[in-house]
Amino acid sequence: DAKTTQPPSMDCAEGRAANLPCNHSTISGNEYVYWYRQIHSQGPQYIIHGLKNNETNEMASLIITEDRKSSTLILPHATLRDTAVYYCIVRGTGANSKLTFGKGITLSVRP
Amino acid sequence: DAGVIQSPRHEVTEMGQEVTLRCKPISGHNSLFWYRQTMMRGLELLIYFNNNVPIDDSGMPEDRFSAKMPNASFSTLKIQPSEPRDSAVYFCASTGQSFSSYEQYFGPGTRLTVT
């Protein structure tokens, strides 16, 4: 599975959009981009995933560049409860493909 | 749905003792995963099961660690003997369709401290 690169941290103001970047320049054609988050002292939580098209659900939007080498997770109206570590993961669909968590990006939402 | 249930939530034990962590996956899910999280190594996959059968245990650190899934609703992770370096948060996760299903549901974790 391809590796991902995320900045270590970022912050945003409550009510504003949070745009979390991720680089995955070695992604291959059958690999998906997943986003999970982990709020302090809790287990990770699935947010969204995509292959090449932009995706949106009730939690967030995922924008994948046309060359698929990078993506952005967008939380449209960040709240204090969105403060967490966000993991960008690239994963294939084969039987031996695993969720490999890196260090993630720590998002701090300030009042 | 109660989600993935793990017990105990906290465990403190002395070096050399046996530790058993328990997990009840979400009903109907057929894949189960055990992860370990430490500050130094982050979140690591230890082992996963599909339909109660261990598929990949390459992440299990050493022979002191063993995992079983006797039925679809219960799994255990055992450490015998335990060592201080085993101190970590251990998460169990399950997923419903197949191993490659996109959404894994994580339990609240067991915080293990070995003194």
Image (tube, coloured by chain):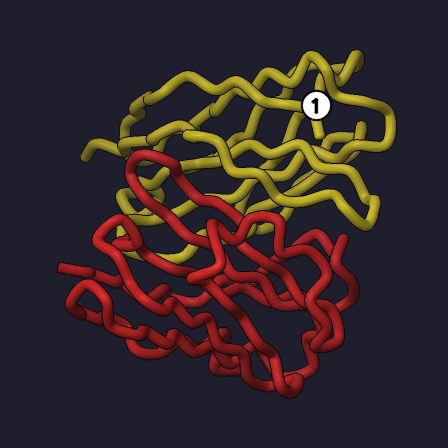
Chain colours: A yellow, B red
**Which image quarter is the C terminus of chain B in?**
bottom left
Q: Within 10 Å of the Cα at label 1, are there few (<14), some (14-19), or many (20+) other Cα atoms?
A: many
Q: B63 left or right of A27? A: left
Foreground residue among B103 and B20: B20
Q: Quadrant of residue A108?
A: top left
Q: Quadrant of residue B20?
A: bottom left
| Vertical relation: A53 (above or below) A65 | below
Q: Residue at x 61, y 79 (%)?
A: B69
| Vertical relation: B51 (above or below) B108 | below
Name the amino acid, label 1. Ile
Q: B46 left or right of B42? A: right
Foreground residue among B109 and A106: B109
Q: A23 left or right of A52? A: left
Name of the residue lying farthest toward the right: A29
Q: Residue at x 27, y 33 (%)?
A: A109
| Vertical relation: A84 (above or below) A16 | below
Q: Position of residue A54 (x, y in %)?
A: 73, 31
Q: A55 left or right of A95? A: left
Q: Position of residue B64 (x, y in %)?
A: 42, 62
Residue highlighted by disc 1: A64
Q: Position of residue A12 (x, y in %)?
A: 31, 25
Q: Residue at x 19, y 63 (%)?
A: B15
Q: Residue at x 52, y 19 (%)?
A: A21
Figure label count: 1
Q: Does dot 1 land on a helix, a strand or a loop?
A: strand
Q: Position of residue A97 (x, y in %)?
A: 74, 43
Q: Chain of mark 1?
A: A
| Vertical relation: A85 (above or below) A40 | above
